[in-house]
Image: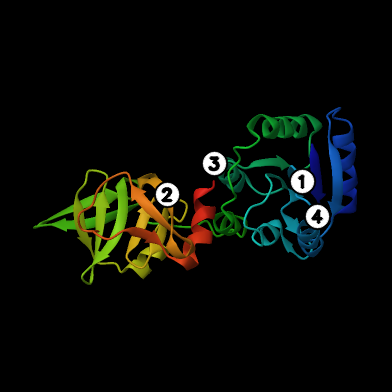
Amino acid sequence: MKIIIIEDEKRAAKYLHKLIDGLEMDITIMASLSSAKESTEWLKGNPFPDLIISDIELGDGKIFDVLDKFDKTPPVIFTTAYDEFAIRAFKNNGIDYLLKPIDSKELKLAIGKFIELKGSQSQVDLKYLTALINGNSPKFKSRFIVKIGEKLKSIPSEEISCFYSLEGGTYIRTKEKRNYSIDHTMDQLEELIDPFLFFRVNRKLILNFNSIDTLHTWSGSRLKIELSFSIKEIEEDIVVSRERVKEFKQWLDR
């Protein structure tokens, strides 16, 4: 297995080398890099390793700044000294971590976990994790209030299959196949909903991840989506706009 180490503290990098050498595993350290700039240049000019072990905070930026420059990257084991809340968020997003000071047994377990799951790792949700690391835990709407006649109904966000616009109005489609009008515009919704769960595929439609059934390549490097439900209000083909295809694929590949 080939890995690279990204660590800006020489002593910490040397210690990590020593731990890896003592694991008695078939590991080749391709490079030890010490900055975001150096790491970006190395990844652009060399074959990707099987695994990256990286500190989060580097002298000239965060490792997220590096990863964000590539469509897809190798799996990453983060080394971090951040608080428990952020670490739980890493774990919930399918990302492994090592809390400094690094323990050799924990390192071996993390690498062993990677070997077991090789080929099924998720992509890092960079925007979400960057917000956590910066101490700005994202606050998204957990429910929407809709009016039904003279009554009000609260709909949890996870129960929403999609948001769509029609004839100047904005609507919710629930998993129970009910439609409700809401006051927010589509642009406003993008700022209110969890981007890990929802994606705006085009000007008229925001989809829940679980609403997508099948994808097809479409003309002009676009993607056509088949939903896991039918919605007569959206009669035309559901197509991811060309400028959003790259970001959409990254969102799906997690």
Q: Amino acid at mark 3?
A: Asn
The residue pinned by badge 1 equals 49
In the rendered view, would you say 163 is above or below 88?
Answer: below
The mark found on residue 46 in the picture is 4
The mark found on residue 66 in the picture is none
**Separation (CA) of disc 1 from disc 3:** 24 Å
Q: Amino acid at mark 4?
A: Asn
**Separation (CA) of disc 2 from disc 1:** 29 Å
Decide if residue 16 is in sight here.
no
The residue pinned by badge 3 equals 92
Instruction: Tell me where residue 149 sits by quadrant.
Output: bottom left
Q: Position of residue 116 (x, y in %)?
A: 66, 29
Between discs 2 and 1, the one toward the N terminus: 1
Q: Residue at x 27, y 61 (%)?
A: 236
Between discs 1 and 3, the one toward the N terminus: 1
Q: Are marks 2 and 3 in contact (CB under 8 Å)?
A: no
Q: Amino acid at mark 1?
A: Pro
Left/right placement of residue 156 relative to residue 138 reads left
Left/right placement of residue 130 relative to residue 50 reads left
Task: Nearest to the eye among marks 4 and 2: give it.
Answer: 2
What crowding class fits label 3: few (fewer than 14 Cα within 10 Å), some (14-19), or many (20 or more)? few
Task: Nearest to the eye among marks 3 and 4: give it.
Answer: 4
The residue pinned by badge 2 equals 215
What crowding class fits label 1: few (fewer than 14 Cα within 10 Å), some (14-19), or many (20 or more)? some
Q: Residue at x 34, y 58 (%)?
A: 238
Total numbered labels placed on residues in the image: 4
Between discs 3 and 4, the one toward the N terminus: 4
For the residue labelled by badge 4, is the local secondary structure a helix, a strand or a loop? loop
In the rendered view, would you say 53 is above or below 198?
Answer: above
Q: Position of residue 65 (x, y in %)?
A: 68, 62
